[in-house]
Amino acid sequence: MKPKDCAHRDTDRGQRPDEGSSAAVGIAMTDLRPSYAFVIPWPLGREGGVNQVVLNLLHQCRRSGRFRPLLIENIWQRREPFEFTRLGYHAIQLQMRQPMVNGTVREMLSYMAFLPSEMRRLLRVLKSHRVEVFNPHFACIDPFTIVLLKKLRLWRGKLLISLHGSDVRLALRSPWAVRYLTKWVFRNADAIVPCSNNLLQATLKLDPYLTNCHAIPNGVDTSDFLGSEPVALRDPGTEMIVSIGRFERKKGHDTLIAAFRKVASKRPQARLWIIGEEGDSMARIRTLTEGDMRIRLFVNVPHGRAMATIAQADIFALSSRIEPFGIALLEAAHFGLPVVSTRCGGPEEIIPDDAFGRLVSVDDIPELAAAMEGLLEDRTEAREMGERLRKRVAANFSWEETWRQYEGLV
């Protein structure tokens, strides 16, 4: 079944393999360690939250030495596995069918018709690369065939399903039959790994009887912060508020803009810079900010340059309506920036109380404005708060610790 209704399938579609060969298993392999396969439903790129998570887990897997890191990209057009190198990692593109997307019998019958050949193709990849751990990210019910292979004892590895937020919400909105199959996949996985306790609770709404859920928070990677140039330099004498996040409704940029204008009405030197990838609210945000020279939008900025840009700020603001974790908060904390965030799920696990940041209600424009204005007014408190959060993040949110917990599940 072609997953045409899953919007995430089109992410980074333009990404191309670094190099490769059409021979499915023709690349000579001298590394005899078992493989840990990281699986995503699009070509891996450097930008985007899930991509950053997978890239950092690949790095940690390589550093630990226990497994050989393997990247698998679930690409519908690949009828046969295609091996190549992606960002320095051995990678395979192949097609893994979902049993259904819209919950129809016709979809399931189509899946069953192709199942024998799909199982043979997938099993060949698993065995030839000695895959011991199969770890899909943003999975929906993609691992259905893997569960069948485990049930038939044709593959005896571990299945870890990593959840990032939108995937859980997609499953909760799915037709009854799709939710049923997703629950079956989750119950038969070795572990379900949401990226926060908040997302774990959302996962349990899908199936309250899951006993294999283990929340593992993401970390922060500062390696590409060094040596990058900011996309722009702040003007002298201004007060800079910065936010980062894809231009989509759930990020609440409209609320942030309205709150900023309240601040700027009292502090004319205030400026707002928003950095993000183009999304479904891009046109609306451009309209909202048109002609306002105090607000600047930076679109599709490389990650390193985005980090160099936010490092100039006085305050970091996160206005999301929902956020399963909040890696952007960890990145802001690395620079010691005081943070204002909405209470939208994951941020509460990073900012436990007012000593580490300011938490405000979702879509509460006056409360968000007051929090930002207060930090601009009291620079000493803002600086001390940012330093406390920096120390907390450095001590508790590293990719080394994240990977240690992942390894502990296998």
Image: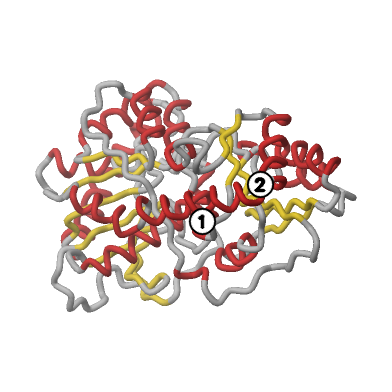
Amino acid at the residue labelled 1: Glu
Q: Nearer the viewer, residue 305 or 343?
A: 343
Name the mark nearer the viewer: 1 or 2. Answer: 1
325 over 77 or under it: above or below: above
Residue ID at (66%, 37%): 371
To which quarter of the image does residue 398 belong?
A: bottom left
Residue 174, how many percent across, how many down?
45, 27
Q: Earlier in the sequence, mark 1 or mark 2?
A: 2
Q: Nearer the viewer, residue 375 or 367?
A: 375
Q: Name the mark on residue 331.
A: 1
Of residue 59 and residue 362, the one placed in the foreground of this image is: 362
The crowd level at tag 2 (other Cα within 10 Å; few <14, some 14-19, many 20+) is many
Quadrant of the rendered image containing residue 56: bottom left
Can residue 12 be seen in this snapshot? no
> Residue tagged by mark 2?
247
In this rendering, the answer to whether 256 lies above or below 183 is below
What residue is drawn where x is 27% and y is 63%? 61
